[in-house]
Image: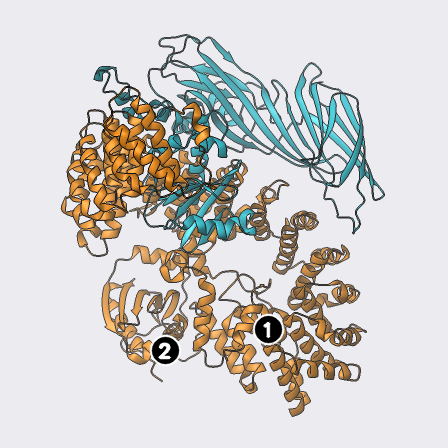
Amino acid sequence: MAPPAASQRYPSPSQPSGKSEVSDLKTQLRQLAGSRAPGVDDSKRDLYKKVISYMTIGIDVSSVFGEMVMCSATSDIVLKKMCYLYVGNYAKGNPDLSLLTINFLQRDCKDEDPMIRGLALRSLCSLRVPNLVEYLVGPLGSGLKDNNSYVRTIAVTGVLKLYHISPSTCIDADFPPTLKSLMLHDSDAQVVANCLSALQEIWSLEASHSEEACREKESLLSKPVIYYFLNRIKDFNEWAQCLILELAVKYVPSDSNDIFDIMNLLEDRLQHANGAVVLATVKVFLQLTLSMTDVHQQVYERIKSPLLTLVSSGSPEQSYAILSHLHLLVVRAPFIFAADYKHFYCQYNEPSYVKKLKLEMLTAVANESNTYEIVTELCEYAANVDIAIARESIRAVGKIALQQYDVNAIVDRLLQFLEMEKDYVTAETLVLVKDLLRKYPQWSHDCISVVGSISSKNIQEPKGKAALIWMLGEYAQDMSDAPYILENLIENWEEEHSAEVRLHLLTAAMKCFFKRAPETQKALGIALAAGVADFHQDVHDRALFYYRVLQYDVHVAERVVSPPKQAVSVFADTQSSEIKDRIFDEFNSLSVIYQKPSYMFTDKEHRGPFEFSDELGNISITPEASSDIVPAQQYEANDKDLLLGIDEKDDNKGLSSNNGSAYSAPSLENSSNITSQMQELAISGPATSATTPQSSFGFDDLLGLGLSTAPAPTPTPPLLKLNPRAALDPGAFQQKWRQLPLSLTQECSVNPQGIAALTVPQSLIRHMQSHSIHCIASGGQSPNFKFFFFAQKESEPSNYLAECIINTSSAKAQIKVKADEQSTSQAFTTVFETALSKFGMP
Amino acid sequence: MPVAASAIYFLNLRGDVLINRTYRDDVGGNMVDAFRTHIMQTKELGNCPVRQIGGCSFVYMRISNVYIVIVVSSNANVACGFKFVVEAVALFKSYFGGAFDEDAIRNNFVLIYELLDEIMDFGYPQNLSPEILKLYITQEGVRSPFSSKPKDKPVPNATLQVTGAVGWRREGLAYKKNEVFLDIVESVNLLMSSKGNVLRCDVTGKVLMKCFLSGMPDLKLGLNDKIGLEKESEMKSRPAKSGKTIELDDVTFHQCVNLTRFNSEKTVSFVPPDGEFELMKYRITEGVNLPFRVLPTIKELGRTRMEVNVKVKSVFGAKMFALGVVVKIPVPKQTAKTNFQVTTGRAKYNPSIDCLVWKIRKFPGQTESTLSAEIELISTMGEKKSWTRPPIQMEFQVPMFTASGLRVRFLKVQRFDFYTLDSTILSKIQCRVFKSLCN
């Protein structure tokens, strides 16, 4: 078609609202409606095109609905398509008018041309007007029986559309069983594929309230059905193959032969040109072999090269999607990819999001044999024009340094960065050097001599400055002019805009004072005075606290502010293994890209800027937190530090092993972690003596993963003795949870005190731990919390697994128990319930 | 749900909607505004091609001057989403004849609406093969069959074909002249030290084909790759011929290739789609044979002058020659004036890409040619911004030469039922090199 004059009617958004044009169109259409003159179709087409183009740019043309429908009595298929498009767009807003269209759509559904039959049926189902559903059932029914496969494919999707408009009509018309038989018997691959997607959607939505749908959903995963699909997977197009592979992931194979059969069937899919098919196959392989450790390793080896090929071909966006998955695998099994590190080198023309991922992967695969080369490569990037990437690569060097035992060479490199004399490089490097010193104090001599020569005037970034100041305070005895540099900085107190830097100045002045009192006394005095007068709440509070504690007793002050340092031995992992496993389970989906499990971004309550609100929620319930301080710290928390990294929950491990000195480490202010804030407040607030209990509380709170640190002595449970130090890794838990049959389901109520105490999942986790029931995963927010617990028998390695869903508004808990020994599951449930009932009791 | 796209948007660079199609009701109509305010108008744009705003995820891609955005509300399959966009664009291109940009969309919006309806239904991708879709969605629009007798209708046939087993090829093709063209295009990524040692080198290659064959031919392609040759000699129980074999790190194939047969017999056999397509992609890291040596020297003479010397040496056989050699030598942004001399070809300064572009039409083997340039820079007031020397790029075609050494040994048409093959032309084999330099 494309009439030559098309460009004249070029729609432009600068056009007026189009009212006069629309009424023009209306009259023109009306004139044409009755006409049977030859060539009338062509003029209709032009008009229709105009209408559609107005519609596209957002002008409301719904007022010509009637005329459009009148003109639709045509035999021109292009005209029909445009009309269908128009009707589909406006029917929802004009349910009454759409009644007009039913007639001609129904007539078209009986057309002799399968093309028109299909198109009409599709439009009919796309009207999405609830009171018209009665007209859908008939055409859909005949569409499913149509002898043309094109019509059938459309009818199958039509059923799904009907289900979304009115589930009951769809079920009452008995469509799902029809689809099922079509799925198993139709000769056409696309029909079968659409049946599968429709049935999966319908049954999983129905499953929540229908036993039968639940059974049907399970039956899709039965061995005959799975093999029916897998055996003819080559007949399907690439998209349908993805669908089938996704189904196969959920299949639980009966034995190892079954597993190998499926893998043999699917092996050639790894060579497919469509990255989505390859990823789906990879997922099947990985999930199938979870229980077989050595085969699982072989799978990694096998999938490595197809994935690397996919990364190097296609658009950057596609390689990004693949790389994100590769990233997940690399982080899970870095040793397998250690030899392939060169594939993760950045290329000049790659976009920064790809580079960023590659840098993370390089960090992950670094080991003793390849560190030197990786660090050399990373150092090249540090001179990159893209500042963000340069920063990332410096951080990557630092991370590798923190991972490795042999940091000698890396320290030299880092110190070389300082000589580059670029503001951002220096700032990043200082932060890293500070982190390194916290872990390897033995390097202080080398570092300090270089750091000491840096003029603080050259550093603009607060983080870098803070790191430098921290080092000045910490190593005041080794740097001859430390007090004078500090004094200089303190004199310029007013010009220092960052509260973070001012906080560090205070602490550093204190530390310096304990080591070299005569030289620092004056500066400290100025600093405290300026601090107390500071408008920033944190700075003010800290200055006041330091002042009072000095007044009380200098030695106590020294013990509080500058206790003997311990090296940080364990740094926080970026994410808890529970979350990582969940992401792994959701391989080949958005979760991997976002690096968080799906419930975090698809659940309603997690949507939006959830991290922020989440934290605020927590804060309001911690009695120690005074709310006027917290928002300020929240503000500071924006910029995250390397050590306490991207991580949200676990960093207290690092902090608490650093114990006393942790609070003065610069990283603290950057942590968004609530407990560290509590520690901070406990120290800087009036309740000084609480330091130790607070930190151990925080330790407990944040572990929350069922690590065997349960402090409280186990009260002897009735009947069943549980091992208080039970351990089970999340992978094994998942495996078991999937394999074991459900032995018990129970509902019980939770006492009101318990509900009151259950504001965060951690409170219950701690409580249950004291009863030797350990939590492996938890999630949710008020009013719904979900927990996975496990426990082990005292004497033998027999496991109990439990899922517990607590609804705080109805004060009910639903417990599902699975056990290695079915016979004792009742006893365990009793223990569990008893423990739960004591929750919240003093 | 593996992939259920809720909507697809086509936006221009300003953020105006060119075309949108909503497949599901689970996203609001204002989603595109969210995309505009939170992604297009912020620095986020180049940062990540997948973003989440208010419960919906946006999977987007920029192709020429158009943003294609897929909106999903569930935990969708991203790789599938991107692949869908790429395939859809390929489909549109085959309809518009090459170009895909804002104007092409505006001029063809009715057609695009038709196609969007066919390639995705309720968020699930359907058939995206241009070969099949062109049968029943044509730019002229299929005239209604009412005027003609039902027997003459091509349409039912077409709709049957939509879902047929060989989805990429329609039946009943007939050509007077049956032709097959095959190209091997390799892109070489190379990192050299300043002394000229190769630090890293890898090749990503594609085998591109153009088929104009009648009926349903079954083709078989033989390459000189190691596994294939070994398997062949094993099957024929005779020792493998000596000669260079290539070890492919990994291969992926077009959906037309029978993968089962490849796995068991290591032969590439396929029923080709009609017209142009990418048969396979491969990756090689070992034993890469470079056709050229590039030796650059860059001297910075003070603040405002630079001297660039690039020597290009061809190291392939003296009887062969390279065609269309283009060397792109990056220069700093603040270049004001350039003076150069070349021994062969022509050179030009292209300010829009900050490169000296040196073109040589024909470059015989075992020869060398040099470019020496003097560059004057605008003196800047502030501190001299460091210039991170980007890699030198080179493009060329060497007939019958590949960097990897991959050769086509044979291309057989298995089913000679009703025609004979007129010509199997192994046309150019091109090579594209990205050269990266250590300072």
Q: Is residue B284 above or below residue A130?
A: above
The label on residue B58 is none
Amino acid at pointer 1: Asn
* Within-10-Å neighbours for mark 2: few <14, some 14–19, many 20+: some
Q: Residue at x 23, y 65 (%)?
A: A745
**Residue B395, how many percent across, how many down?**
65, 27
Q: Quadrant of residue A182?
A: top left
Q: Is residue A614 above or below residue B7?
A: below
Foreground label between 2 and 1:
2
Q: Is residue B411 left or right of residue B387?
A: left
Q: Residue at x 15, y 38 (%)?
A: A138
**Residue A629, how many percent across, how many down?**
54, 77
Q: Which residue is mark 1?
A: A658
Q: In the depicted view, which residue is nearer to us: A626 or A668?
A: A626
- Secondary structure at badge 1 equals helix
Q: Is residue B229 left or right of residue A71?
A: right
For the colour cyan, the matching chain is B
Quadrant (top left, top right, bottom left, bottom right) of the N terminus of chain A: top left
Residue A602 in view: yes
**Residue B204, how many percent across, how many down?**
56, 32
Q: Is residue B384 above or below residue A446?
A: above
Q: In the depicted view, which residue is nearer to us: B145 or A212?
A: B145
Quadrant (top left, top right, bottom left, bottom right) of the C terminus of chain A: bottom left
Amino acid at pointer 2: Ala
Q: Which residue is mark 2?
A: A757
Q: Chain of mark 1?
A: A
Q: Colour of chain A?
A: orange
- First reached walking from the N terminus: tag 2 or tag 1: 1
Q: Is residue A224 above or below residue A568?
A: above
Q: Quadrant of residue A60?
A: top left
Q: CA distance from mark 2 to mark 1?
A: 30 Å
Q: In the depicted view, which residue is nearer to us: A345 or B238?
A: A345
